[in-house]
């Protein structure tokens, strides 16, 4: 019997248990990215639980049939009417199981259809770069916000694929 796909649910970071799990997953996911890109100064790696909770972001999570949070996506509405994905994190135990695609698909098709979506990732984060490219995001100019860190920016102006 196939295992059901995780369901997308809003996350309430005012709930202590939820916030702790989101923070733990974020730290684990960003530690993997730091290794991939060779840069351990990713701001979210040093972000406290209180700092994460203070972010003015919208949060959704992919929750398994057993109630396990497999990953999350947080975004903010941009001044130009678009959507800026602030963070997309998958628990390492759930890597390569479609969780990031599921979360992005939900935001693009169900929550923010027809709006431009932007996201950035470490330019050397090959799995993330491949994901955004596969989903139709167009890569913009790379930039370097800190010495030793090269970031890639992506924009999706149509959500027809979803």
Image (cartoon, rainbow, N blue to C red):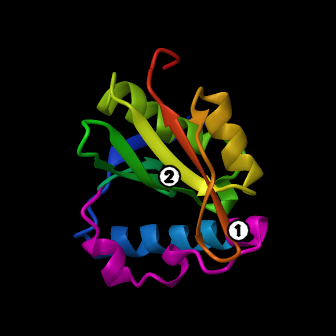
Q: Magenta segment, principal secondary structure?
A: helix
Is residue 40 rendered to the left or right of residue 110? right
Query: Residue under circle 1?
Result: 32
- Identify the secondary structure beneath mark 1: helix
Q: Residues within 10 Å of mark 1 (few under 14, many from 20)?
A: some
Query: Where is residue 127 shown, x and y percent of the image?
Result: 73, 48
Is residue 83 rendered to the left or right of residue 126? left
Q: Is residue 141 magenta?
A: no
- What is the distance, in whole Å, between disc 1 and disc 2 at their CAs? 25 Å
| Quadrant in which the N terminus is drawn | top right
Query: Residue under circle 2?
Result: 66
Query: Where is residue 41 shown, x and y percent of the image?
Result: 61, 80
Instruction: Look at 42% across and 37% down and name the residue there.
Output: 117
Part of the protein shown in magenta: 32-57
30 vs 15, nearest the viewer: 30
Q: Which mark is residue 70?
A: none
35 vs 15, nearest the viewer: 35
- Identify the secondary structure beneath mark 2: loop
Frontmost of labels 1 and 2 is: 1
Asked if one can make out residue 2 in the rendered structure from this viewpoint, the answer is no
């Amino acid at each position: 019997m196939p295992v059901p796909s995780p369901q997308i649910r809003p996350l309430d970071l005012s709930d202590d248990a939820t916030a702790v799990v989101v923070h733990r997953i974020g730290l684990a996911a960003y530690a993997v990215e730091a290794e991939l890109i060779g840069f351990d100064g990713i701001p979210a790696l040093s972000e406290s639980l209180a700092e994460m909770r203070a972010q003015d972001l919208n949060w959704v999570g992919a929750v398994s049939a057993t109630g396990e949070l497999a990953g999350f996506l947080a975004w903010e509405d941009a001044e130009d009417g678009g959507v800026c994905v602030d963070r997309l994190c998958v628990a390492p135990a759930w890597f390569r199981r479609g969780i990031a695609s599921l979360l992005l698909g939900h935001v693009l098709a169900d929550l923010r259809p027809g709006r431009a979506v932007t996201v950035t990732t470490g330019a050397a984060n090959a799995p993330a770069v491949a994901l955004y490219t596969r989903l139709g995001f167009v890569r913009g100019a790379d930039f370097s916000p800190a010495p030793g860190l090269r970031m890639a920016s992506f924009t999706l102006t149509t959500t027809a694929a979803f």
